[in-house]
Amino acid sequence: MSIWEYANPKKFMQTSGIVLPWVSALAAICLIIGLTWGFFFTPDAVNFGATVKIIYLHVPSAMMAINAWVMMLIASLIWLIRRHHVSALAAKAAAPVGLTMTLIALLTGAIWGEPMWGTWWAWDPRLTSFLILTLFYLGYLALWQAVDNPDTAADLTSVLCIVGSVFALLSRYAVNFWNQGLHQGASLSMDAKDHVSNIYYIPLLISIAGFILLFLSLVLLRTRTEIRSRRLAALLLRERIA
Amino acid sequence: MDLGKYAQVVLWSYAGAIALILALIMLSLWQAAITRRALREVEDRQGKPNG
Amino acid sequence: MISLLMRDITLAMRAGGGFGLGLAFFLLVAVLVPLGVGPDPITLAKIAPGILWVGALLACLLSLDRLFALDAEDGSLDLLATAPVPLEAVVVIKSLAHWLVTGLPLTVIAPALGLLLNLPTSGYPWLVAAFGLGTPALSVIGAFGAALTVGLKRGGLLLSLLVLPLYVPTLIFGAEVIRRGALGLDATTPLLFLAGITLGSTALLPIASAAAIRVNLR
């Protein structure tokens, strides 16, 4: 790691600095529209009553929890293959966001499960997989915390992320095998017959867009912070040497 | 508007989720502000940007 | 390579090597759970597969942090890394040694503990098969966790946080084999999955572990 390799991060900082306000504004707009539409202007579902409004939080956050891990996996691979520092830092920046999304999905699921399934928690395959995903996020973050040298930490967490992805997938199938679930099938699908009806579908799409944009802006912001703190560490180091 | 017998459930999940998101945003902004300030300080002290 | 294997085993057998420790821990789990749950034989028989596997996971975890840490401390890991033997092979050998001193004894005494936990008779062959096929995966996966944390001073707790989620598939399929076996059902499918996990992780994980060790020695 050195300050002299700053060509790429510099460009990243410039571009992301321009993009970030727009993305976050768009995220805020989409979230506000999607959630208020979902909360105030959708009818109650026949079976679920008003609880149907929770899907505007539950489904997007669950999607982003998985997508965040996939993004971390890709960023880790880029780091291991191309040694692109911004990539490693982006993976690090995404982890807390992914963890929060997992927690939101679990929380809304638990609150929804209480009246619907009569229990806060059931060892349903999807719930269990998400709990395991949470553990993977925690382990990943803990490893970042524990290793002092930033490049070593980036390497180790990248390897963990790749191995973890394989095992998370395995656990998903193992858990399916272990217990058949209470969960309903996919709420979104290309086939119009399968997914939830249009009144719920459009605000749901807007919320999902909002969550994606929110994830994007948070990752950009946090990556910028990480780059700055790396630069700060480098400057301090140089100061100490000089 | 009437949320019926599930009012509590819906309100709590919205409150919880929004609180978590806000906490994450605040944390990120706070960290960003701290690092930016510290970096600017060091850069000013060293006298040349992008050294 | 054989001498490395012998060396590791001898080191583990010596006092302070933690050879008996894992076994004693496993035994303690099997004794403490009935004390906590109550002596009802039906309940015990029902939860026996899970307890045996969870006990095995934890017993394996106990000795993991010394797998590479001791060698890293006295510098022999650097020697091994520069030796003509590929580091991947070293990882495999060390995992094998770990399995021989933890997994294999666990497999041997598991039926006795099954007896304590009132496991139905039809479960025993499956119990031995599941432990024999499943515990090598525990050692290999554990070696990966140990490789990640080898350079850290307070690696022990982190190691369990990293390794235990990776143990989930092994735990699920392993316990499922015994559960089905105990009910007198055919447990071939989960057993095949279990063997698949063991073979797959033995083939692929040492590469990741060796990479992690190289990073840590850098």
Image (cartoon, coloured by chain):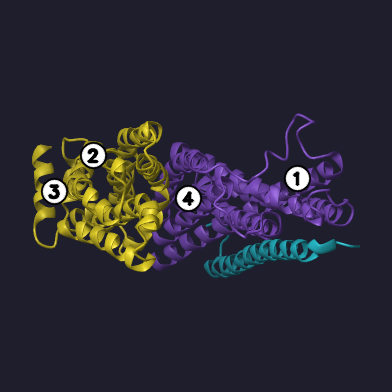
Q: Which residue is mark 4?
A: A4
Q: Which numbered tag is attached to residue A30?
A: none
**The residue tagged with tag 3: helix, strand or loop?**
helix
Q: Which residue is mark 2?
A: C92
Same chain? Circles 3 and 2:
yes
Query: Chain C: what color?
Result: yellow
**The residue tagged with tag 2: helix, strand or loop?**
helix
Q: Which residue is mark 3?
A: C8
Q: Earlier in the sequence, mark 3 or mark 2?
A: 3
Query: Chain A: what color?
Result: purple
Q: Nearer the viewer, mark 1 or mark 3?
A: 3
Q: Nearer the viewer, mark 3 or mark 4?
A: 3
Tell which of B49 and C62 is nearer to you: C62
Q: Residues within 10 Å of mark 3 (few under 14, many from 20)?
A: many
Residue C18: give x, y in percent of width and height.
Answer: 17, 59
Q: Label 3, label 4: how many angstroms apart (C-alpha)?
A: 45 Å
